Image (tube, rainbow, N blue to C red):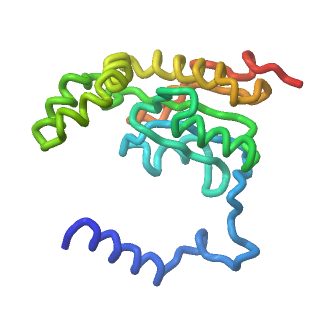
């Protein structure tokens, strides 16, 4: 059985035995509006799945969770910023938490190493040339997750599309113990109305 078949089989079993916390009538359904008015921007690391949110006391329906490699922001209107803009202006998000984590997998990665692996897998050198500068600027600058969180908080905070009254917090998570540490307290940097 391949991965897709295993996922579909698991889904059939899940639907047939729907747990109480997911079942309910349409008027009992969880809203698309996060009840804690919170967006969490974090890494796609597998160790955070079913660990980060419970460690933060967050349940289904309480927060928008945005993920990418290394919880990185690479431009003024890239996917993370677009997601935050929609969250803030359309879905009631009033606070943002950038949560990096210790022992991040891309902290030791390099653009050169990634490019070599891409070439070995048949990616065209012309395609790589299109993204090489951006890849180098992103990947070769990420070596310390704590510094990255602080930089990402600053990028979001200074983005002209993010309102000044939205606190942007920066935290670091230990994927082994579940401990959170505050690196940036967004309340101290927010212009309250």
For the point 25% across and 65% down, the residue is 3
Quadrant of residue 165 in the image?
top right
The residue positioned farthest toward the right in the image shown: 193
Up the image or down, 73 lies above or below 45; here it is above
For the point 46% across and 51% down, the residue is 50
Quadrant of residue 124 in the image?
top left
Quadrant of residue 125 in the image?
top left
For the point 46% across and 84% down, the residue is 16
In the rendered image, the quadrant that contains the C terminus is top right
| Residue 70 visible in the displayed image | yes
Total labels drawn: 0
- Spot occupied by residue 23 in the image (x, y as percentages of width and height): 61, 76
In the rendered image, the quadrant that contains the N terminus is bottom left
In the image: residue 89, left or right of residue 170: right
In the image: residue 1, left or right of residue 105: left
- Spot occupied by residue 145 in the image (x, y as percentages of width and height): 42, 22
- Spot occupied by residue 90 in the image (x, y as percentages of width and height): 74, 48
| Residue 143 visible in the displayed image | no
Comparing 92 with 119, the one in front is: 119
In the image: residue 140, left or right of residue 188: left
The residue positioned farthest toward the bottom in the image shown: 16
- Spot occupied by residue 77 in the image (x, y as percentages of width and height): 57, 33
The residue positioned farthest toward the front in the image shown: 126
Comparing 85 with 36, the one in front is: 85
Comparing 21 with 78, the one in front is: 78
For the point 40% across and 26% down, the residue is 102
Comparing 30 with 117, the one in front is: 117
Up the image or down, 133 lies above or below 48; here it is above
């Amino acid at each position: 059985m391949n991965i897709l078949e295993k996922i579909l089989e698991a889904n059939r079993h899940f639907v047939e035995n729907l747990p109480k916390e997911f079942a309910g009538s349409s008027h009992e359904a969880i809203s698309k509006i996060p009840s804690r008015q919170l967006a969490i921007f974090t890494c796609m690391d597998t160790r955070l799945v079913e660990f980060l949110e419970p460690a933060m006391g967050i349940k289904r329906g309480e927060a928008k969770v945005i993920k990418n490699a290394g919880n990185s922001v690479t431009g003024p209107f890239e996917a993370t910023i677009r997601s935050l803009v929609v969250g803030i202006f359309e879905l009631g998000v009033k606070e943002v938490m950038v949560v990096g984590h210790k022992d991040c997998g891309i902290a030791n990665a390099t653009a050169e190493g990634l490019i070599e692996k891409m070439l070995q897998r048949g990616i065209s050198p012309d395609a790589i040339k299109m993204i090489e500068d951006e890849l180098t600027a992103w990947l070769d600058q990420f070596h310390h997750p704590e510094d990255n969180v602080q930089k990402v908080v600053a990028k979001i905070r200074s983005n002209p599309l993010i309102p000044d009254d939205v606190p942007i917090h920066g935290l670091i998570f230990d994927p082994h113990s579940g401990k959170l540490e505050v690196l940036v307290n967004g309340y101290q940097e927010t212009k309250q109305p």
